[in-house]
Image (tube, grey):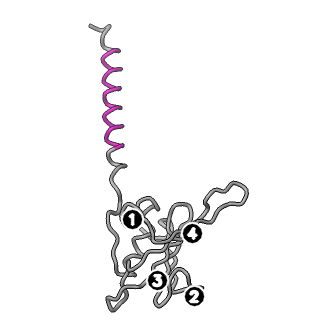
Amino acid sequence: MLKFLPILLLLSNLVFANHHEENKIEQEAVPLVTELPTFYSDFVEIIGLVTADEIIAILGEPAKKIDIRMKSTNDVIASTWYYHNLNTDDTGRYFPTTELDIVDGYVESVVFMNEVDENSNFEGNKYEIPKNNDKMI
């Protein structure tokens, strides 16, 4: 009987480890945010928590996308995305255009544009997005 004890211990450790791996994978698959608010100040508070891929999953592809690339490697280092009629102001009216500036896969800043669109040279009200390490717990 003592011969089988080490084998049983090894098998129980493998089963225990596999069980925890399965739980870890399930926990990682759940997104933190599944929808984004339309009111502009609430939107600014939440948008920094989601990745660019999650934004596309929630909102769909942007109306216009401009990628900034490294000249030497042609890798995308930043992007500017434009969405139309996405966010509302204090009166409940939609901003015609919302600009998302994305760096390293996360929104760095948001610009809400009235009376202008992505083809204009005018910059609207810009909001810097707080990073997780900037927020107090």
Q: Find out whether the residues at labels 4 and 3 contact each other: C-beta distance under 8 Å.
A: no
Q: Residue at x 41, y 74 (%)?
A: 45
Q: Residue at x 33, y 48 (%)?
A: 27
User: Mark 4: which secondary structure?
Assistant: strand
User: Mark 3: which secondary structure?
Assistant: strand
Residue sitting nearer the eye, 33 or 134: 33
Where is 2 relative to 47, above or below?
above
Q: Is residue 130 left or right of residue 122?
A: left
Q: Is residue 99 magenta?
A: no
The segment highlighted magenta reads 6-25
Q: Residue at x 39, y 65 (%)?
A: 60
Q: Is residue 87 left or right of residue 65?
A: left
Q: Position of residue 37 (x, y in %)?
A: 33, 75
**From the image, which quarter does the N terminus lie in?**
top left
Q: Amino acid under label 3?
A: Phe
Residue sitting nearer the eye, 73 or 130: 73
Q: Nearer the viewer, mark 3 or mark 1?
A: 1
| Upstream in sequence: badge 1 or badge 2 | 1
Q: Amino acid under label 1?
A: Gly
| Upstream in sequence: badge 3 or badge 2 | 3
Q: Amino acid under label 2?
A: Phe
Dot label at residue 112: 3
Dot label at residue 87: none
Determine the CA span between mark 1 and mark 2.
Answer: 25 Å
Q: Which residue is mark 1?
A: 60
Q: Find out whether the residues at labels 1 and 2 contact each other: C-beta distance under 8 Å.
A: no
Single out the residue that lies furthest toward the left: 1
Q: Amino acid under label 4?
A: Ile
| Upstream in sequence: badge 4 or badge 3 | 4
Q: Which residue is mark 2?
A: 122
Q: Nearer the viewer, mark 3 or mark 2?
A: 2
| Upstream in sequence: badge 4 or badge 1 | 1
